[in-house]
Amino acid sequence: MADKKLSLGECIYISIKPIIRVYLILGTGYLLSKKGLLTPQMTKDISTLVVNALLPCLAFNKIVNYISYKDIKMIGIIVLTSLIIYSLGLLGGVLVYFGFKTEPRFFYGLLFCSSCTNISDLTISIMQSEGLQAIFTTEQLGKGVSYAVIFMSVQNFCLMNLGLMTIPYYDVREDLKKDEEDNKSMHDTITNASGNTMDGDGSCASDELDSEEIEEAEIAHHQENFKQRRQRRASLQSVLTRPFTNTGGDGTTELVREYSIVSKVKTGDFDVSKPMDLYAEHPSENIDQKAAEMVPELNLKRQTFSEWCYKNKLGWLYYILINFKRPCSVATVLGLLCALVPWLRILFVKQKGYHIHQGPDNAPVLSVFMDFTLYVSQASVPIALLLLGGTIAKIDLGKLDYKFLKAAVVLNVYRLCVMPIIGIAFVNRLVAIGWLDKGDAIQRLSLVMTFAVPSATACLYFTAMFTPVTGPQVQMACLGSVYVVAYLMFFVTLAVVLTYTIKHDLGY
């Protein structure tokens, strides 16, 4: 039990204050998007910056600062808790699908969004709030952020290394196969018709372009390229000088148009079963294809590890290992290595029980890296929340699937009301069996909070990747319903969960 006692009103205030800050940032992103200042292309570019620079710095800094070899058990508990959360979410998705007989073309998407949780942006933002500083120290809140980073790393491993981000593809796979068969049959019909209409005039077919015709074709080609470049520059200029007014465009279709790779999947330019671009949060090409384009002679130089893996039916191993090269994965692995080895950790931060010669400023010799990562990482969570607000703004309310709305309400009641109850019971059980220290309040709050957040923002992007640009966008309509309902409920549900946990479980 805590030494400091708070009234119920004080607990409610402390719980609501960080949530208000989150919604203010989301609202700012929403307005920027509605006014045309945060386009899907900008969202895509900025999110790539976040995952390649800002989040890796955040992960390394918080892990090295607040994790040590004494926290190995807690890391194991976080992994176990993550698997339980994914399983509970998956169960909820299955129950909603069969209970409400929802849209069959959103089965895999429903399982995807019900199992993935927003355990990075929201939880880190709340842990960094001034409101919680009334009951927790800066050291405790920093440790809470480091726990959230471990949760995020586990989910990224499942999505990227294990390939679970391609789950929404299976909702459209049959449609893509059918379209491919239709296109093939149409192509065969046209080919046969062309063959029948050809006469014996071989001289016309065998004539070649003379030098003047070739030159004219090249000039026309260069003129077309120049025209396209000029149009792109004009488009960029229009974005930079766009007035502060609503664009009035179709938000959901615009989002799909920016992220969709269905056309590449149809033509075979993108293979879902192979690793994707390592430096994009929402990849649009395979890693081997990009490497071959950058270094054309790559395939002629040597027998690559990937070729050996695929030849020996170990493509899954290559898929898992190559994704460890992602910046977030590299930062997490290096951070854990430095944090769990005391003689490495002491090079970056001071540690009780270990001594090493300090620099002239009486700080560890490599503390400059901690200063650098701290300075850069401070922008990661606010920017991520702005992008989340902008993405929610792109959901076209006019295209929401209102037939699916009842299922979306039940799914979010399960995620935001039932799962936190299960989470509180689970955490109390861990305390009872001695896995968690009853006096370590930040550990318990971190675990409970992870059960109480809505679906991950990444679900929107990955679903948009595998949604056709043309035709009915059933998947995005259903998913949009889930997100709109979730963020209408989240303000109240999280406030109740935090208030109950702080007042009752933690004893404040």
Image (tube, helix red, strand yellow):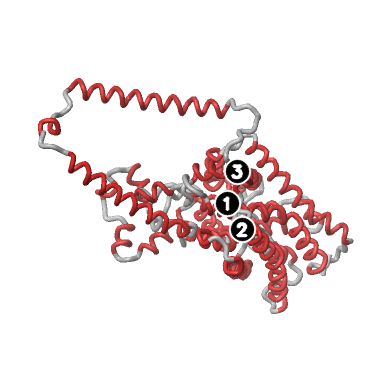
Name the N-terminal-most of marks 2 and 1: 2
x, y (%) of residue 397? Answer: 64, 46
The residue singled out by tag 3 in the image is 394
Q: Is residue 119 visible?
A: no
Q: Residues within 10 Å of mark 1 (few under 14, many from 20)?
A: many
The residue singled out by tag 1 in the image is 477
Q: Nearer the viewer, mark 3 or mark 2?
A: 2
Q: Quadrant of the N terminus?
A: bottom right
The residue singled out by tag 2 in the image is 404
Q: Quadrant of residue 133?
A: bottom right
Residue shown at 57% from the left, 59% from the top: 113
Q: Amino acid at mark 2?
A: Phe
Q: Nearer the viewer, mark 1 or mark 3?
A: 1
x, y (%) of residue 234? Answer: 49, 25
x, y (%) of residue 299? Answer: 27, 49
Residue shown at 32% from the left, 25% from the top: 222
